[in-house]
Image (tube, rainbow, N blue to C red):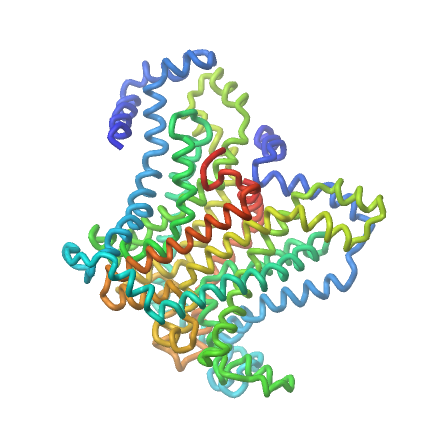
């Protein structure tokens, strides 16, 4: 960081004496290596100006808090004054032996798996269906994406009003003669998590569809044309050519979906809130963190939960990266190639 | 502008270029064949399912509470505009719109500016540590807000930014940067070196090149990340929930939730409030839908 600051100084001066600085940047003919050595300092200054602000904000407000979480996690701390009550691994032992956390973790696992199982096939099906010349194609795409664009609060409030026991969903079931199916969708512990799954699917499946449609448009027309000429049927082409070629897109979507499911907070908090979520069986690791951390005034404990969430996400991500993503994003996270 | 166009379609890595390219042959091939009716039928069902809850919210805002109680899933028997006009004439609604607007515009402006500068450095300068820098930003995707929120709250409090929009805006910029840089770097890398050399011959330095040409050439990418940042900020829930405890500082999502619990018995008005709060994001999105899809394509192909 120190050298960056120095460099900022250098460029800050540069505009002042515009003459020489301007010449030094522009005058050298595009003779590659020579130019680089001569204009090294201005170049470093430019770099500092260009990269500095983004790096600073990113380090200060993303990396630092995460590092602080790792630190506070070893303390019993109410959030005021310096953290002095060092408790070692006690927070972690409490988390890992707390049945409430186990339950939250199992809900996250359920959402991770079921989101993939439910959203994936639906989205692939819809994307294949829409990947042809259709009237109103762009209108259809916009409309499918609408739930993804509206906020979690709107989604949560709308759905919880519809799903009340005297709400629109039960009323509608009654009207079509399925009144027997009407139930308490939100607070029945054996049903609530499925309700959550439906809402999540509704909200996020549009994103998967749009992503897959984008992936489908990257498949060269010549390949499917050649297969048609060779006598392959529509279904054969989809099954043996299009689907395998969609692999990279599907695998990236699955990665984003898994990470999102592990971090799930907003919808659960909005629809069920802190207390109902645990009785209705929809609590997640993140709602557990907020309920037992900040809302309980235990910032050390909350930080430890954050670290556990992060480590679980990281392990899942690394395993996924190692065994599934390997070929697609060679180095996207390890930073091998730009 | 001619140069911009050729780059957009010529550079395969320029996100928005790819779909444009891919669509052309498809159009010509399928000209003779029409999609069977069943496809339209299925598309109609899918769209219907996606829109039904939204329609419930919007139409519910036009009903009266007694109507909603007696017949929860019905259509408005008579149109009550009063729910909407009541919300639109309440000052707290407009305060929240203003707060959300300021937060979203400031977040978007800074994310685009900082992201573009960083992406320019990462894609067009050769320097030691470039790979590490890029990896640092991409690793940011692994640090979601959920993990950082507890200490972030302490940090914002220590900086004295509680209950101020700044306390929401700055962290939002930080957390939006990784995705922004990942989307923008391919756009900037796709600009041919010849163009930069030509600009240098014409007396334009690297920074001049940045101002005069890169900004314009990367416009599709800039619009994509801008929209994502705007919508992300407009809809943000968790961060404002932690930072903004004072009703005067509420953004729309917090305000909508507070309104819903305060007027729990007045369902119709809650629905009207909720409908109005989603309009800006919807308008913004529908204006630039193509750009978002294009940008995502670029990001996926990476």
Q: Nearer the viewer, residue A16 or A313?
A: A313
A173 vs A221, left or right, is left
Specify the quadrant of the image occupied by residue B110: top left
User: Vertical placement of B175 versus A185: above or below?
Assistant: above
Q: Measured from the top left, where is residue B208 in percent x and y?
A: 42, 25
Q: Is residue B140 left or right of residue B28?
A: left
Asked whether residue A207 appears in the rendered view, the answer is yes
Is residue A296 positioned above or below B10 on the image? below
Task: State the residue in front, B4 or A190.
Answer: A190
Q: Position of residue B112 (x, y in %)?
A: 42, 42
Q: How many marks?
A: 0
Question: Can residue B243 be seen from the camera position used here?
Answer: no
B182 left or right, relative to A94: right
Q: Quadrant of residue B247?
A: bottom left
Residue under the point 62% across and 56% down = A141
Where does the image place residue A93, in percent across and percent down from the top left? 29, 62
Instruction: State the residue at coordinates (58%, 67%).
Output: B51
- Give the residue at x 59% y 53%: A210
Q: Quadrant of residue A179?
A: bottom right
Q: Nearer the viewer, residue B136 or A334?
A: A334
Rendered-image quadrant of the N terminus of chain A: top left
Residue in the foreground of this view, choosing between B3 and B294? B294
At x 45% / y 25%, what residue is drawn?
A: B209
């Amino acid at each position: 960081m120190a050298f960056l600051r120095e460099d900022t100084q250098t460029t800050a001066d540069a505009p002042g004496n515009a003459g020489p600085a301007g010449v030094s940047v522009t005058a050298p003919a595009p003779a590659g290596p020579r130019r680089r050595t001569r204009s090294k300092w201005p170049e470093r200054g430019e770099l500092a100006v260009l990269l500095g602000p983004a790096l600073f904000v990113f380090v200060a407000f993303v990396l630092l808090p995460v590092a602080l979480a790792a630190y506070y996690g070893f303390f019993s701390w109410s959030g005021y004054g310096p953290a002095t009550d060092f408790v070692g691994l006690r927070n972690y032992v409490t988390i890992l032996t707390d049945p409430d956390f186990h339950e939250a973790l199992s809900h996250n696992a359920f959402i991770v798996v079921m989101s993939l199982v439910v959203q994936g096939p639906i989205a692939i099906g819809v994307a294949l269906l829409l990947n042809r010349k259709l009237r109103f194609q762009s209108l259809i795409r916009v409309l499918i994406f609408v739930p993804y664009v509206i906020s979690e609060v709107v989604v949560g409030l709308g759905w919880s009003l519809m799903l009340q026991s005297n709400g629109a969903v039960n009323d509608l079931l009654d009207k079509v003669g399925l009144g027997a199916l009407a139930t308490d969708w939100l607070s029945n512990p054996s049903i609530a998590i499925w309700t959550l799954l439906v809402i999540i699917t509704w909200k996020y499946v549009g994103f998967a569809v749009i992503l897959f449609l984008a992936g489908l448009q990257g498949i060269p027309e010549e390949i499917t044309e050649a297969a048609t000429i060779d006598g392959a049927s529509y279904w054969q082409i989809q099954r043996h050519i299009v689907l395998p070629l969609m692999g990279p897109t599907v695998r990236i979507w699955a990665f984003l979906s898994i990470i999102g499911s592990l971090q799930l907070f907003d919808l659960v908090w909005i629809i069920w809130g802190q207390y109902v979520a645990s009785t209705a069986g929809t609590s997640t690791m993140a709602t557990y963190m907020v309920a037992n951390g900040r809302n309980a005034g235990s910032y050390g404990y909350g930080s430890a939960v954050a670290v556990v969430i992060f480590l679980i996400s990281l392990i899942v991500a690394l395993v996924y990266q190692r065994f599934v993503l390997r070929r697609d994003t060679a180095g996207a996270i390890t930073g091998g190639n730009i | 502008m001619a140069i911009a166009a050729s780059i957009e379609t010529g550079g395969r890595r320029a996100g928005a270029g790819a779909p444009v390219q891919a669509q052309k042959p498809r159009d010509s091939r399928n000209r003779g064949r029409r999609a069977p009716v069943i496809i339209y039928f299925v598309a109609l069902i899918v769209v219907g399912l996606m829109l039904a809850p939204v329609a419930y919210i919007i139409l519910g805002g036009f009903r009266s509470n007694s109507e909603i109680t007696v017949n929860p899933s019905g259509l408005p028997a008579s149109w009550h505009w009063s729910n909407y006009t009541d919300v639109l004439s309440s000052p707290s609604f407009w305060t929240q719109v203003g707060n959300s607007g300021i937060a979203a515009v400031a977040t978007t402006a800074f994310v685009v500016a900082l992201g573009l500068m960083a992406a320019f450095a990462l894609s067009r300068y050769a320097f030691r540590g470039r790979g590490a820098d890029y990896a640092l930003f991409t690793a940011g995707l692994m640090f979601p807000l959920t993990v950082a929120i507890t200490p972030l709250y302490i940090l914002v409090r220590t900086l004295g930014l509680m209950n101020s929009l700044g306390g929401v805006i700055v962290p939002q910029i930080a957390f939006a940067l990784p995705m922004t840089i990942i989307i923008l770097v391919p756009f900037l890398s796709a600009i041919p070196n010849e163009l930069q050399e030509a600009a240098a011959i014409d007396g334009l330095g690297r920074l001049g090149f940045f101002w005069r040409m890169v900004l314009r050439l990367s416009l599709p990418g800039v619009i994509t990340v801008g929209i994502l940042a705007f919508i992300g900020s407009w809809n943000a829930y968790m961060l404002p929930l932690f930072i903004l405890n004072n009703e005067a500082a509420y953004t729309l999502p917090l305000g909508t939730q507070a309104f819903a619990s305060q007027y729990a018995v007045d369902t119709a008005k809650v629905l009207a409030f909720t409908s109005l709060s989603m309009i800006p994001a919807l308008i913004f999105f529908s204006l630039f839908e193509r750009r978002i899809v294009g940008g995502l394509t670029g990001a996926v192909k990476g």
